[in-house]
């Protein structure tokens, strides 16, 4: 019996990972029933993608090292998906604490508990723009980094600066956040540097994945579904000028399983869709709108893409008028980046092959939201996987 712990087990990515693990145990080489899943949670403790009775649910605070050590003891592997995405100025420290110091606590606890295998979910935003040399066709990969790119709004000029910020904040000094422009980007970059450091200097058996922008079922907290819904319903007619590597979340979950089973400790793997899924946000929104129109919606054909400077000015006004609002300068800066990557390494080393069409993933995302809105809520723990996870 293999015991696997999953942080953020009921979030968008974590829940899809757990669902894939329950459905496809053979991918890790174990017989049916040979895996016990410890589903670690903070607030959310259910997700319709899987039957909660099939896992052991435990509360977990990723900032509490002693709790982590206790919960990790005896586990054969840990998949760390817990994290926070928030672009509001008031949330900068919370994002850093969860995504960086939380990951550091997880790494330390995994070492102390002797966990033989650790999967860490980062983001493609930690890799920067592969076309910074002027080649519009070049994709970022696991060897890419944003240091020295004036267009990338990060606070650090080198890996050592990123690691120094981790040490400073761990000691209570958050001074660097005073000049941070996008705390989420800083956090994901620092987390990746931390994972490499722990693998290199401390022998932590950590394998990192860089998920693209995931699309599909299970998005209870509106990571991508809010964008899809507002475009689908004709309520959003503008777009950012940036681009991303989109990926069906079911493919992402399978890629994460492969990385856990086959990835080399200390290495990172981009888990994204095919190259045809590297789209500008305007192209993605146009695809959503086309699907919506095919089902009778009056979604706009193609969104307008205002200059970044104009949106930054509007965001600055919005931040003062509505401090808790979604339109912030950090959000605009993030949406203006070219986050397109290649998953060639995952294909070559892990046997990863994306198979979910992006249009299918969009429809699954929309359908999931409709079901959630139409019902007062499914019976706690009841699986909606047969409805939401298309073959």
Image (tube, rainbow, N blue to C red):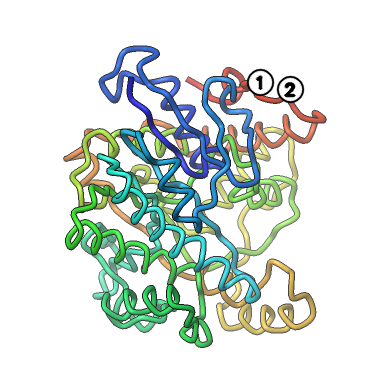
- Relative vertical location of residue 56 with respect to residue 301 in this rendering, above or below: above
* Residue 213 left/right relative to 135: right
The residue beneath circle 2 is 379
The Cα atoms of the two marked residues, 2 and 1, are separated by 5 Å
**Label 2: how many Cα within 10 Å (few below 14, some 14–19, many 20+):** few
Q: Which mark is residue 3?
A: none
Q: Secondary structure at mark 2?
A: loop
Measuring from the top left, give residue 209's x and y in whole percent: 33, 49
Count of labels in the image: 2
Q: Quadrant of residue 163?
A: bottom left
* Residue 27 left/right relative to 319: left
The residue beneath circle 1 is 382
Q: For the point 25% across and 60% down, which residue is it?
A: 198
* Residue 16 left/right relative to 266: right
Q: Quadrant of residue 379?
A: top right
**Label 1: how many Cα within 10 Å (few below 14, some 14–19, many 20+):** some
Measuring from the top left, give residue 144's x and y in whole percent: 25, 65
Nearest the viewer among 361 and 67 is: 67
Nearest the viewer among 341 and 289 is: 341
């Amino acid at each position: 019996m293999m015991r696997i712990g999953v942080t953020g087990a009921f979030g968008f990515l974590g829940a899809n990972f757990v669902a894939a693990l329950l459905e496809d145990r053979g991918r890790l080489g174990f017989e049916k029933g040979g895996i016990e899943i410890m589903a670690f949670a903070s607030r959310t403790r259910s997700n319709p993608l899987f039957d909660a009775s099939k896992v052991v649910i435990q509360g977990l605070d990723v900032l509490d090292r002693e709790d982590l050590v206790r919960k990790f003891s005896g586990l054969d592997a840990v998949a760390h998906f817990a994290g926070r995405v928030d672009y509001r100025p008031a949330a900068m420290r919370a994002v850093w604490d969860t995504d960086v110091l939380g990951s550091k606590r997880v790494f330390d606890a995994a070492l102390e508990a002797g966990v033989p295998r650790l999967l860490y979910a980062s983001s493609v935003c930690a890799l920067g723009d592969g076309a910074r040399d002027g080649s519009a066709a070049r994709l970022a990969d696991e060897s890419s980094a944003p240091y020295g790119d004036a267009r990338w709004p990060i606070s650090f000029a080198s890996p050592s600066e990123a690691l120094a910020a981790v040490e400073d904040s761990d000691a209570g000094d958050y001074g660097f956040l005073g000049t941070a422009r996008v705390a989420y980007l800083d956090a994901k970059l620092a987390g990746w540097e931390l994972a490499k450091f722990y693998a290199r200097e401390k022998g932590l058996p950590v394998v990192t994945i860089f998920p693209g922008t995931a699309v599909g079922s299970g998005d209870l907290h509106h990571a991508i579904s809010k964008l899809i819904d507002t475009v689908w319903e004709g309520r959003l007619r503008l777009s950012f000028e940036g681009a991303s590597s989109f990926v069906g979340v079911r493919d992402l979950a399978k890629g994460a399983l492969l990385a856990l089973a086959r990835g080399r400790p200390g290495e990172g793997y981009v888990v994204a869709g095919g190259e045809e899924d590297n789209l500008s946000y305007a192209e993605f929104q146009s695809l959503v709108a086309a699907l919506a129109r095919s089902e009778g919606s009056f979604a706009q054909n193609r969104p307008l893409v205002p200059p970044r400077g104009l949106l930054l000015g509007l965001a600055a006004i919005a931040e003062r008028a509505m401090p808790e609002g979604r339109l912030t300068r950090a959000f605009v800066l993030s949406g203006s980046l070219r986050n397109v990557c290649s998953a060639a390494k995952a294909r070559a080393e892990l046997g990863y092959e994306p198979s979910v069409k992006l249009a299918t993933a969009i429809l699954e995302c929309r359908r999931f939201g409709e079901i959630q809105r139409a019902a007062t809520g499914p019976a706690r723990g009841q699986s909606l996987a047969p409805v939401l996870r298309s073959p």
